Image: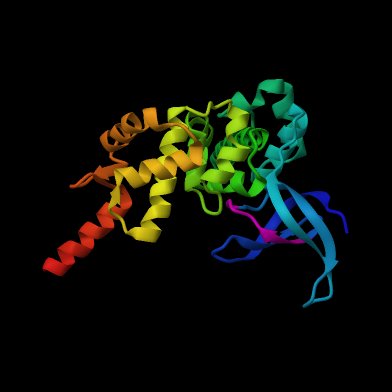
Amino acid sequence: MPNEDLIATVERVPFENESGWKIIVTDKGTAKGTVSFDVKPGDCLKFTGTWKHSEFSGGREFDFKTAILHLPEEPRALLRYAVSLTKGLGEAKEEAIWEKYGCKWREAETLELPGISEATAFHWRDTLRRLTECFVQTQAMAFLLDHGCTLNLASAAWQQWRANTVGLVNADPYALCDLPHYGFAWVDENIRPRFGIAGSDPRRIDAAIAYVMGQLAEQQGTALPVSDIGAAVEALLGNQGAALPEQIDALCDAGKIVSLARGCLALKKDFEHETVIWERWKA
């Protein structure tokens, strides 16, 4: 059965586990699947998946593979959505807000309207904050998807870096290598071309060094000869030998790798772990 899209408003989330799998009750029915970000009542989501019958209740439910925030683009429709999120507001106040502020209603942090209680004003400011977060997330997700990320990778990036996502990835797309299930090879093949990163770009070489050191550490221990690292990077990237010493020095200066005795290097995390073990053994 082909996937279809379902745009629905969240009513409640009666169950979720640590992996992000959720049961979400919406105005269109119950949806089940994994969402890597917080879901709140009132959120509008776009689900992609299929309808099926529950194995437990026999009822109809939407089994989704992906879910992203969905915000109306038209200003009046977005205002209607904002009003629906705000306790104390309704159709009459929506009309009054539109008449007074028009398309600039999002700039009205303090609603200068009669009949607005302090509690309602507080809820309105909270709604504006939520909308801003939603816009930032939506823009970040769109940026990542447009630059070759899968929806799962984009969601993982947002969960890890939040509002810093676009700036961090734009500065160095290989930061995505640090996220689960997406290593250097995948990012190098699928993401690098979207950013126009040359084969000799220092960011690429840095990521390759970190990758091969991680692979070698699993095979032969954490203290790695520079010659072994160089050979592995050459095999991975081709002729990048001329730039390798300079990049290794830069990574050492940045504290990402540690220079050891006898021409060996270690990843910072491996060096720290070994140091902790050594200190405990001495004690």
**In the rendered view, would you say 76 is above or below 257?**
above
Where residue 197 sits: x, y (%)? Answer: 54, 27
Scheme by which the image is coloured: rainbow
> Picture coordinates of residue 36 (x, y %)?
59, 53
Instruction: State the quadrant of the N terminus.
Output: bottom right
Residue 31 on the magenta segment: yes
Q: Nearer the viewer, residue 154 or 121?
A: 154
Left or right of residue 235, residue 45 in this image: right
Residue 234 in sight from this viewpoint:
yes
Residue drawn 63% across the image and 33% down it: 147
Instruction: Kindly indicate the quadrant of the structure image that contains residue 27.
Output: bottom right
> Is residue 89 in the magenta section?
no
Question: Quadrant location of residue 116?
Answer: top right
**Is residue 10 shown left or right of residue 136?**
right
In this rendering, the answer to whether 101 lies above or below 163 is above
Q: Is residue 191 left or right of residue 226?
A: right
Magenta span of residues: 30-38
Task: From the top left corner, tell me how far across and down residue 10 is, in percent.
Answer: 71, 53
* Residue 173 or residue 145, whichever sits in front: 173
